Amino acid sequence: MNYDLRGKKPAIPIGSLVLVTGINGYIGSHVADQLLQAGFRVRGTVRDETKGAWVKDMFAGKYGENRIEIVSVADMRQAGAFDEACKGVSGVAHVASDVSFSPDPNQIVPGVIAGALNVASAAAKQASVKRFVYTSSSIALAGAKPDVKYHVDASQWNEEAVAVAWAPPPYTPNRALDVYAASKVQAEQALWKYATEQKPPPYVLNTVNPNFNLGTVLSDKQLGSTTAAVVPAIWRSGELPAQFTAFLPQWMVDVQDAARLHVAALVDPDVQGQRILAYAFPFNWNDVLACLRKLDPGRKLPDDVEGLGHDIGTIDTELGEELLRRFGREGWTSFEESVRENLGLVL
């Protein structure tokens, strides 16, 4: 494994089995890929095993059939949904979430909390589980605030979004992002509460809180998924769809860096009870367009958008940067490289 443990034993044994929920998603597939590169075996969950067959084929072809297995968890909200999936694993990366962006919190938030606690309780039943990592989000800390000076550290919670999400109806479409934020805030809070209430704690809990993910797409099956789809769509169409501008200027992180931080949170004995903030660089859509023009100066691309603003916040990213250096990297993957790699399957 290409990670500097500074002479210490890994928190979970190299070669052991790790559960990755939502393995067919953009982040989940990269978490699995980084774990497999590090020498672990992976069991991934999907809602429908037939729809996850491509994941098994992809990783079996790359790492061998004995390194990857796929299991179906049709409804993570159901009690006991992950009991079988957690058997025999040494660590859990809970990446799966509800990204349907309904503006009704009653349709989203309770289910996301239930799913997180179902995985947590299933893992607690297995003495073999020593580490649990939850894929939270930057939006659990704070929302995007263009042209406003602000600071984010690991102590913060986006209670403003929770209040908006749970305000009385009507549940208008403009509340969808706040509902998503509330699901991340309240699910993560529920996990920390669960972990601290267990005596003794059944495992070490860490979270990774990534901002907007860009970078390599492992399969064309994922080109319809959230942030993975945005840059390729602009490249192919020559247009910036209006729904994309709903993503305000904020920070980004390369998806492989976000995945590496999940591995660090699973294996590093010194990383315990941490919220790892995965913010690499601030950007807006004009920055994306500038990168695309450099790649192909003659390509038809949209004009810059006026009045986008910039994210001028400061973020406490020291822990994430240090963990990436332990992988032998200089720090965060550059914005330009992430944009270029995001186009890998369509160039």
Image (spheres, helix red, strand yellow):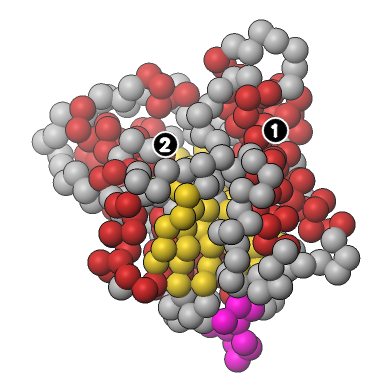
The residue beneath circle 2 is 226
Q: Image height check: is 38 above or below 184?
A: below
Residue 2 coordinates in the image, percent (x, y): 44, 80
Residue at the top extreme of this rendering: 170
Is label 1 or label 2 in front?
1
Whether 8 is among the magenta residues is yes
Extent of the magenta region:
3-13
Residue 297 coordinates in the image, percent (x, y): 15, 39
Residue 306 coordinates in the image, percent (x, y): 39, 21
Q: Image height check: is 208 above or below 87?
A: above
Secondary structure beneath label 1: helix
- Would residue 98 be found to the left or right of residue 198 on screen? left
Evaluate whether residue 126 shows in this view.
yes
Q: Image height check: is 108 above or below 280?
A: above
- Would residue 291 be found to the left or right of residue 184 on screen? left
Whether 84 is among the magenta residues is no
Q: Amino acid at mark 2?
A: Thr
Q: Give the camera-side residue of 253 and 318.
A: 253
The residue beneath circle 1 is 110
Which residue lies at the image location 56% right of the left edge and 59% below the top edge? 85
* Quarter where residue 186 is shown: top right
Evaluate whether residue 184 shows in this view.
no
